[in-house]
Every structure is written in structure tokens, then in C-alpha cells.
Amino acid sequence: MSSGTEAPIGDSTQNSTLERCLEVLRTAKNDSEQFAALLLVTKCARAQELDNETRHRIFDAVGFTFPNRLLFSKVTPEGCPDYLYRGLGLTLLACFCTDPSLASHIQVINKIPILNETLNISCHEDMKDLTCIIEDAYQCIFGILASPEGPKHLVSAGTVSSLCEAYIKQSHGWTQALRILTALLTSLSDRCWKRSRNELQCLLVKLSEDFDNEGDSRKFHLAEILPVFLPPSPYLIETSWGTNCLNHLSKGLLKILSSKLSVSQRDPAFKLAACLSNTYGSSWIRIDSKVEKAKFLSLLVNLACVEVRMALEDPMPLNSRQAAATACYALIEMGIHECTKEEYHPLLREEQKLQLLQVMQEACAAVMYYLKQVGWERMEDPFLLASVRLLGVWLAEETSCLRQEVIQLLPFLVHYMQTWFQRGVAYRNQLKEASEMALLSSSWGGLWPGDAIRFLLPALCHLSAEETSRKILISEGVPALLCEYYQLKWQILSCEEELTPESKSEAQLSLQSCCGVFLNLVVTEPILVCQEPCFVDLLKLLMQSLPLQLIKENQLILVANMSTLGLMMSRLLASSPVCQESVSRDFFLAVIKFLSRCHVVSGEPDEDKQSIALRDDYAVAWADISELWFLGLQAFCACLPLLPWLSSLVLTSGWFQDLLLLLEKVSPQSVDLELVTSLQTLLTQLAQISGPCRELIQHHGGAEKANVYGMAALEQCLSEMV
């Protein structure tokens, strides 16, 4: 008889047996009868593939009362293994869990702690009964994992910790443990790390060691999954266990990328290196010597540049290479930062930097070529956003190279920024894919991934300072676009209770960069500022927001940008209604606080002459705000004759009196020439336009002070007005 006719008979026999067992279960009068029927049911469940209808029939007949007793029973019949009852219960549970609707039943979810405990039962591979129990437990967990809320239940019940232990100890089923962990961390990384941080740390150490030491195909599999196991917060570098992981990851990647490999073997290595670079820059590279570390970094960047050029210079078949090319973008970005940052003891020698800059320039030229060729047609493609981000990083550091190509591409870049800004929130969900693809970043959080403007803002600061590119930006409507963008970012920053630290930092940096672009326009295009209505709206927003921002801690750089920009614009728009409203007085009071708090007296009070010094918070930020402070003071002086009420505000604020007292207390030799010149401009301007100010200067020995500090213009002004 052929096998084709035997199968139905076998199936018929099994179905008949199953039907009899179910009937016994339904009519069982005691535990012995029910137990005997369950033994046969479990054999049937293991012996054949059951459809969902049959599983539900078994479930309806068995219920959970008796299986619960089996799972929790501590006593077994004499001569039987102590795991007998649990094994029977788990077999039934595994049968149920292959149906998603049953796997999500509360009675199954309640068994997760038992499943966790079962995973790490000590046994040898030849202990068939025990290994079957462990396999049933894994089948249950896979079933729960496939249910809609299953992953959350598993994480909450501590399954991650048990799975980590199973992998680290290489217990029976450890490969399945790794598969489940990969799935859980892919979907619930933050929850997993919050619930099982210590166990995941140990697991990552083990995985990185395996990655370093493996010499077969498993090395490439580990390279593929390791990005999922990296912690969501960038604290690897801050811990000894993290440093250990980075050592192994660096060595493992070096072994892979130093070898001749196929594309399928090389790509996972690129993606792992990209994830590390995106979080840690180049500091994740832990090779024994500085020389070898520099060589490895150069190797990474060179390989990435070659990959990008190969992918982009022939863009038609690119779709299959987008993920790898995006990973290479992250490595090139790391190279750009490494070549442009200023250090006393740089990692790269000057000739290494020049070589890398050359290959990175060629890669960025390929990105520009790609955007020019296909950008207008592929606006929806997330890979385009990743390309724009890399180009923004390059242009933030270098706009003189490839100048003509940049000028030609600018209209497209502006169109791209405008398009996605206008589409806004409606596309937030559609573009989640972009947040994952654009440099593989997990740090974007809830930020709108279509926000291309923030990637190009640093570049716009440079481009708006150059005449040719600035004219294009103006003709394409960038000033009005950035005014809207500034308003949006200010609204985001104002909702502090809803902000993550990353979102807050991003909003601050975006606002600061916007101020930089606007300052360039105010200085170089004053007529535009006076004619474009958007600048009046921007000035009003600055006047409303600065007093609120001033009272917040750790906001000094943003306050300096807002103050100086507002003053520079007030100088041009002094006749507009916004500068006559009450809001302008609040703004100027906030500006006076920013300017007046900068310098303090330093030294012991009993000293004859003390020194002038920066206040602590200003000293910390001085490298970033010094130019803004001096420019702001200069713009404030220019506003004094344009706004007649402003000199009275200076007097009532107490700034003028405090400044004169400061000059009395400190040694003139401690005040540098640039500060003397700026203060002279302020004092002279006030003396010329305000009688009360002039009298106060003279009351404090103004002429003598002017002589001692070398303020010739102030001395002449006072002598002419005697």
C-alpha cells in the first residue's frame, strides 16, 4: 500500500483516539481518570499537527483547572520524576499557545513565571524528558510572543532575564533564547533595559566576546543582530563592562573588515559600526594602540566612501543597497567630525586627515550627484533624508569645496526643506521608517523625522554669509521659512513638561542655529529685514520669549543669541509698532539683565583695587557667547538714540549705577581693551542723549574715570557738555 493511502488511516486512528480522550476528559469522575486521559491527549498533541478548531476543542474539554494543578504540584507518584506533572501541563500549554487567540488568554499569561523558571532547568542533552519540557516552555513563549500584547507581558514578567541566563549558560535551547531576545529588544528596547538591565549587560558582554572569538559564519550573524542589543542610552563608554564590550566589538569588526568578504558578509559589519559611530562618534573604537586605532578609523571611513560612491554614481539599482549605504553615511559623518574637531592630541595625523578629507569629498560629491539626478522624483524616499543629513554635516564644515555643485543643488535643498515642513504632522507616522533609516539613529525619539531643516541649519549659517548662496536662499524664500520654523521650535521648547532631554537639546540647538542665519541676514541684508513682514513677526516673538527664557537655568547660549538678534533687528525696525509696545520694554529689561550680569568684581574686599572677572556661568559659556555679548552691547548702544525711553530704562534698572561702581572698584589694568572700548561707547552714548545719565557719570567722577581707563571719546564728550 502506498504512503499516500496510509496517512489518512493514521490520521483517522489519531483522531479517533483524540475523540475518545476528549470524551473521557468531559466525563471524568476523578483525578485518576482525568490524568489518564491527559496523558493520551498530550501524546496526540505531540504526535500530529492540530488545526485551530481541534486545539479549541481540547482547550474546552481540558480547561485550566486541572493543568494548573499539574503545573503547580510539588508531589508526584512514587517512582516518577518530580517534573512529571509539570511536563504534562507544559505540553498542553504548548499546544494551546500555537493558537494566538489562546496564547493571549489570561490563564496562559499567568504561567509566564513558570515558563521562565523552566528555561534554565539543569539537564544534559541526553535527558530526553527534561529537554522536551524546556522545548515546550520555549514553544509557549514563542506563542505568547506572537500575540498582540505578548511581548509586553513577557518583559513585565521577567522573561528577558531568564532568556539572558539561558544564553549565557548555553542551556538547552539557547539559540531559541537569542531569537526571542532579538525580537523583544527590537520592539521594546527601553522596557527591556529598564526591567533587566544587569542581565542584558552580562548578555552583551557574552555576545561581544563571542563576536570577537568566533571564526565561522556565526560571526556574521552576530554582527547582524548585535545592534539590537546595544543599550538605548549611550553609557557603554562610562562603565568597565561597557569598555570590555567595545574592546571585543572593535577587534571583531577589525577582523571582518580587514578580510576579503562578500557583500552579504560585509554589510552587517558596516551596520554595526554605524550604530556605534552614531552613538559614540569615534570613541567606541578601542584598539590597543593609538596608531592602530587611527588605521582602523581610516579603514572604516575609506571603505564607507568607496561603498557610497559605488552605490550612488549608478543610482538605478540602488534600492537593494540603501541600508548599507546609509550605514556608510554614519561612518563618513564620524570621519568628518574626527577630521574637523580641534584637539591638543588628535587621533589622526595631518596627512591622514588630508587623505580622508579627499575621499570624503568624493563621497559627498557622489551624494550631490545623486540628489541632483533623482532628488526631485524621490521626495518620499527615506534614503533621501539620510543623504540630505550627511550633506548637511559636510556643508556645516566645508562650503568652499565643490562650490559650484552646492550652488546648483541649493534650489532643490530649499524645496526639500519647504516640502516636508509644510507637510508637517500629517506625515509623522508615514515617516517613522525614515527615523530608522536616516543613519540608523535610535535617538530621534518622538521628533518628526521629516524635519530636514535641522540637518541643514549649520550649513545655512555658512551659506547665508556668502553672497552668491545667500541670494539664492533669499530668492527661494528661506527667510520666511526659517521664521515659521523658529516659531515652531519655540513652541516645542515652551512645552517643557512634554520634552525629553534629547528633544529639548535639539530644539535649543535649532533655535541657536536659526539665530545665526538671521544675524547674517540682518548684517548683510538690512533692506530685506525692513521690507519682509516675517521679520517683524520674528522680532515680536523674540520680545515675547526672551523674558521667559532668561529665568531658566543653563540657557545662556540661547539667551545670548536671542538677545543679540533682537537688538540687531530693533536697530533696523525701531520705527515699527512692535518697538513701541509694552512688550518691547520687557524685552529690553531682559536684555539689560543679560548684558549687565556678565562682569563682576573678583578678589578680596579689603584689597585696594580688585580685578574684573566673568561671572561663573558666563565664564563657562564665554567661548560661545563672547562675540554675541560684544555685538549685543554695540547694537544696544545703536538703539539708544532711536528709542527715547530706553535711556530712562537703563537708569531705573540700576545697570548704569552698577557699571560705574564696578569701574570704581576694579583695577583699570584688569579690564581688557575690547571691553573698555565697548563700555566707552555705552557711556558716551548715554551721556550724549540723557541729562540724568550725564549727571550721574559726572557725580561718579566721570572725567577722571575716562582719563584712567583711556576713554578719550567719553572724556571729550563730558568736557564739551560742561
Image: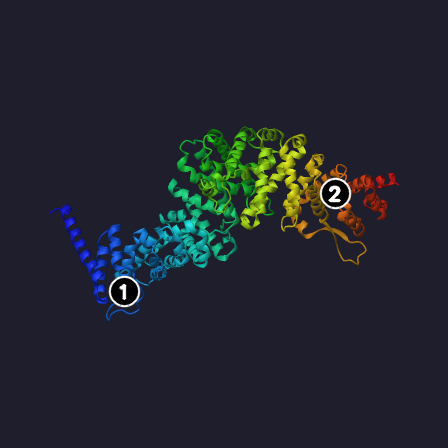
406, above or below 557, in the image: above
- In this rendering, position of residue 466 left or right of residue 305: right
- Tell which of 221 and 248 is nearer to you: 221
Q: Percent position (x, y) of residue 357?
A: 54, 37
Q: Percent position (x, y) of residue 718?
A: 85, 41
- Tell which of 113 and 370 is nearer to you: 113
For label 2, the residue is 674
User: Residue extending furthest right?
Assistant: 722
Tell me which corner region of the image, top left, top right, bottom left or bottom right, holds residue 93. bottom left
Q: Is residue 519 visible?
A: yes
Residue type at mark 2: give it: Glu
Residue type at mark 1: give it: Tyr
For label 1, the residue is 85
* SS at badge 2: helix
* Dot 1 or dot 2, earlier in sequence: 1
Q: Is residue 86 visible?
A: no
Question: At 33% across and 58% down in the image, what residue appears?
Answer: 108
